[in-house]
Image: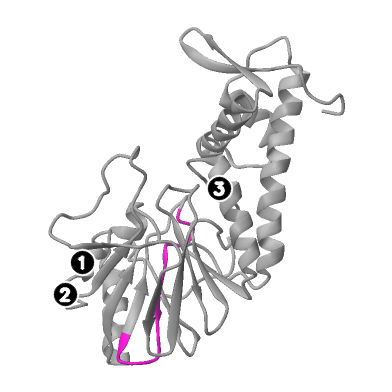
Amino acid sequence: MGPTIPAVTKLTNSVIRILGCNPGPMTLQGTNTYLIGTGKNRILVDTGDKNVQDYQKHLAQVVNQEQVNIEHIIVTHWHHDHIGGVENIYGKIATEPKIWKHPRSQDDEKDHIPPVIPMNWLVDGQELKVEGATLKVHHTPGHTTDHVVLTLLEENILFSGDCILGEGTAVFEDLYSYMISLKKILNLAPGVIYPGHGNVVDDPITKIEYYIQHRNEREKQILEALKKHQDKALNEMDLVKMIYKDTPEHLWPAAAYNVSHHLKKLTKEHKINSVTVNDESRWQFAGNLDSNL
C-alpha cells in the first residue's frame, strides 16, 4: 500500500481529491473522486460507493467551504464504486447536476443507473468546460466497454479511472481492447495521472509503458507454462499458481480473472487450444509458435 491518502487533498489550484472512504482489496484505499474547476460551477469525476456517509460528509464539506455548485458529474464507468454515490449526491449535495457517462456496449447487461436520475451520454472527443477547467473525454474500453479517461487540457492531467491505478495493475473485461486503450493513453502523453484508486502517478509515461510490458510479459509466461506442460490441459488457477508466486493468495481469484482474458486472446490468435475436461474449460499449447517460447 502506498502513502496514506487523506480524506480531502487540494492537488492543484483547480483539482480537489475527495477519497471515497470505501477501502478494500480491489479499491485499495478507496475510490478517488475529483472536484475540478476554479469558479462557482465545478465538475465532479466519479462518486464512490452508495451510502458511504463519511464520503458524503467530506464532499458536502468541500462544496460548502469552497461555496461552489456541482454542475456536472462525470462517471468514468459503470462499476458500483464509481457510480454508486450518484444517488446520494443528486438533489442533495448537488441540486441538479448533469450526470454524464459513456454508453456501454449493446452486448452488455443494462447499466446500473438509478431510473430516477437522468443520464447524459458521453462521446469520444467531447469537451466539458467550467471556469478554469476543460475536460476532454477519451473512450478507453477494456476495463469495461464504457470506460473513459479524461484530460484536463489546461494542466495536461489525465484522470485515468480504472485503466491505470496508483499502485499494482488493473483488471479488465477485454484484453484486446484494453491494450489498444493503453496505447491511446500513451499517445496522449500526460504530464501526471490522477487515478481512480491509489496515489498520484508522477511518472505517467513510465507507468503506462510498464502496464503494456507487464501484460506482454504475462502473456509470455502463460505460453511458456503451457508449453512446459504440453502433456496436460491447464485451467486458470493452475496457471495462477505457477505464474503469480509472489501474489497474496486472497488476490488469486482476480489474477485468475486476468489470466482467463489472456487465454481468450491467445485462443483467438490460435496460439493455444481450448479443451473441455469434465465440463471445465482448460487450455493446451498449440505447438505452432516460435521455438524461443
Q: How far across and how far down the image is residue 98, in percent?
A: 24, 72
The residue identified by callout 2 is: 92
Instruction: State the count of labels.
Output: 3
Give the crowd class for mark 2: few <14, some 14-19, many >=20 residues within 10 Å.
few
The residue identified by callout 1 is: 88
Q: Amino acid at mark 2?
A: Lys
Q: Is residue 110 above or below residue 227?
A: below
Q: Amino acid at mark 1?
A: Asn
Give the crowd class for mark 3: few <14, some 14-19, many >=20 residues within 10 Å.
many
Magenta-tinted stretch: 27-41
Q: Residue at x 27, y 72 (%)?
A: 56
Query: Closer to the N terminus: mark 3 or mark 1?
Result: 1
Q: Nearer the viewer, mark 3 or mark 1?
A: 3
| Disc on res. 178 | 3
Q: How far across and how far down the image is residue 72, in percent?
A: 29, 75
What quarter of the picture does the C terminus occupy?
Answer: top right
Cα distance between the residues tagged 2 and 1: 7 Å
